């Protein structure tokens, strides 16, 4: 046995998101979100599940925070439901929405837990969607008004802000693949949405600086690692395109102020292009304080002419998979973070999401989720490799603190350290909760 030690100020945390845990979908003046509409649309979510109740954390947050304190985490990443603050997306603020998040954040701070706040984790006000949503550049202005309200309202309480969770999911998964709200399937639309998110991000960072808000601000893309199936030129190029679809397209604008040209050319061949207005790229590359990285999986990529969108097929040979069917590829995390550091410099990085779907339930009151422990351990070992290799890694925030509404998969997929019985809403810490608590308390890992 050997021990790996993490830096003494390394931040250990856990994450959730508003629509996935809060419930209270139409309470205290909250407006509709695109996920309320999407999940209420037959056929969109497994078993017809929706977030009307979810984990009922809107009413049970004190119980949840008591469990977080028992877990010993120093950081809790959560998101604000924009429709609770601006029920119509802009215009009148809803005071009950602000009051709720003040009570919640005060309770976190009272328990010694640092709030890491995501402003946008996919629950766009439906009123804005009806005016084009992220396809309409005017949504950028509504987002800026919302962000400014939150910065001023929580100045001094919230010191870590994330503008957007996973722009790839908001653009590609939701507007090209169509699996998430609002469910469009249009590549040009997806590129326009991604660009508008970037402009909103850049303007928000600039506003954060101009207002002199105390704290740090970043963004949380989801990155995915593809290795070529062979060293044939076609396979190497195919893997490069697939990596760029997830990674460079969402990182180059932030750090280089440009899109990767080989992908711009590739999309043009597909009949889609990026509509950039003068000054956009300068705004987008407004320097950030940290990068949140969400990493789950990766795969092998092999060239296949005219296959799907990138002339590339995924070869899943030899990977063990989690219960959501994603490959377990811990070395991909090391490759991703070292590539990112080599490409963009020593950016301060938090892993803002990493975790596994395993659907273990309670037996005699105990949830034996050894596979989740194995997944977490394998990935956290890679983080130690990253730190030894010079990656400027500041912390690890696991997904997820508790089982929750897993988007189009509904409640059929569980990612939590805490099991939730959706009939009774009873919370049961899993074996992984106690394993993670030991790591958080000692800051080292027995391997
Ligand atoms: N292969 N494959 N997958 C295709 C890409 C899927 C990307 N989904 C995510 O990263 C979401 C992220 C989200 O922030 C969180 O809200 C979700 O609950 C987790 C778990 O799903 C992850």
Image (tube, rainbow, N blue to C red):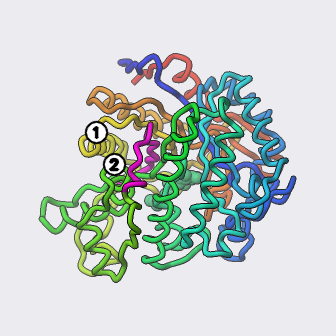
| Range shown magenta | 282-298
Query: Which numbered disc covers residue 255?
Result: 2
Q: Residue furthest left?
A: 232
Q: Position of residue 384 (x, y in %)?
A: 36, 28
Q: Is residue 295 magenta?
A: yes
* Mark 1 neighbour class, 10 Å CA radius: few under 14, some 14 to 19, many 20 or more: few
Check disc 2 and report its element: helix, strand or loop.
helix
| Residue 371 appears in view | no
The residue sitting at 32% across, 42% down in the picture is: 331
State if disc 1 and disc 2 touch (CB < 8 Å): yes
| Residue 221 appears in view | yes
Q: Is residue 252 left or right of residue 207?
A: left
The residue sitting at 62% across, 56% down in the picture is: 406
Q: Position of residue 10 (x, y in %)?
A: 46, 24
Q: Position of residue 233 (x, y in %)?
A: 12, 65
Residue bearing the label numbered 1: 345
């Amino acid at each position: 046995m050997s021990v790996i030690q993490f830096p003494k100020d390394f931040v250990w945390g856990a994450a959730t998101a508003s629509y996935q845990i809060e419930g209270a979908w139409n309470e205290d003046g909250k407006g509709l979100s695109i996920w309320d509409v999407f999940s209420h649309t037959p056929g969109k979510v497994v078993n017809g599940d929706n977030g009307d109740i979810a984990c009922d954390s809107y009413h049970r947050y004190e119980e949840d925070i008591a469990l977080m304190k028992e877990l010993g985490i120093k950081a809790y990443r959560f998101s604000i439901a924009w429709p609770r603050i601006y029920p119509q997306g802009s215009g009148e603020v809803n005071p009950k929405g602000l009051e709720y998040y003040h009570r919640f954040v005060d309770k976190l701070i009272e328990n010694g837990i640092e709030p890491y706040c995501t402003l946008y984790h996919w629950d766009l006000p439906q009123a804005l969607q009806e005016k084009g949503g992220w396809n309409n550049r005017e949504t950028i202005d509504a987002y800026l008004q919302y962000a400014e309200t939150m910065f001023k309202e929580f100045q001094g309480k919230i010191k870590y802000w994330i503008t957007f969770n996973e722009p790839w999911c908001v653009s590609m998964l939701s507007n090209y693949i169509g699996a998430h709200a609002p469910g469009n399937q249009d590549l040009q639309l997806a590129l326009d949405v991604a660009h508008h998110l970037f402009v909103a991000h850049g303007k928000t960072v600039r506003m954060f600086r101009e207002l002199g808000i105390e704290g740090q601000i970043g963004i949380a893309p989801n990155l995915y690692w593809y290795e070529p199936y062979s060293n044939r030129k076609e396979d190497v190029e195919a893997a490069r395109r697939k990596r760029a679809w997830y990674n460079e397209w969402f990182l180059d604008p932030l750090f280089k102020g440009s899109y990767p040209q080989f992908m711009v050319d590739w999309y043009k061949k597909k009949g889609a292009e990026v509509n950039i207005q003068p000054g956009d790229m300068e705004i987008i590359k407004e320097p950030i304080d940290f990068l949140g990285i969400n990493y789950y999986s990766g795969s092998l990529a092999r060239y296949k002419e005219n296959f799907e969108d990138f002339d590339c097929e995924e070869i899943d040979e030899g990977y063990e998979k989690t219960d959501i069917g994603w490959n377990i590829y811990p070395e991909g995390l090391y490759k991703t973070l070292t590539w990112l550091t080599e490409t963009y410099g020593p950016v301060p990085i938090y892993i803002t999401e990493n975790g596994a779907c395993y659907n273990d339930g309670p037996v005699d009151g105990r949830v034996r989720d050894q596979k989740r422990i194995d997944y977490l351990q394998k990935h956290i070992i890679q983080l130690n490799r990253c730190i030894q290799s010079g990656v400027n890694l500041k912390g690890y925030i696991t997904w997820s603190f508790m089982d929750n509404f897993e988007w189009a998969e509904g409640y059929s997929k569980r990612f939590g350290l805490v099991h939730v019985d959706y009939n009774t809403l009873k919370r049961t810490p899993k074996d992984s909760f106690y394993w993670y608590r030991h790591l958080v308390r000692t800051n080292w890992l027995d391997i």
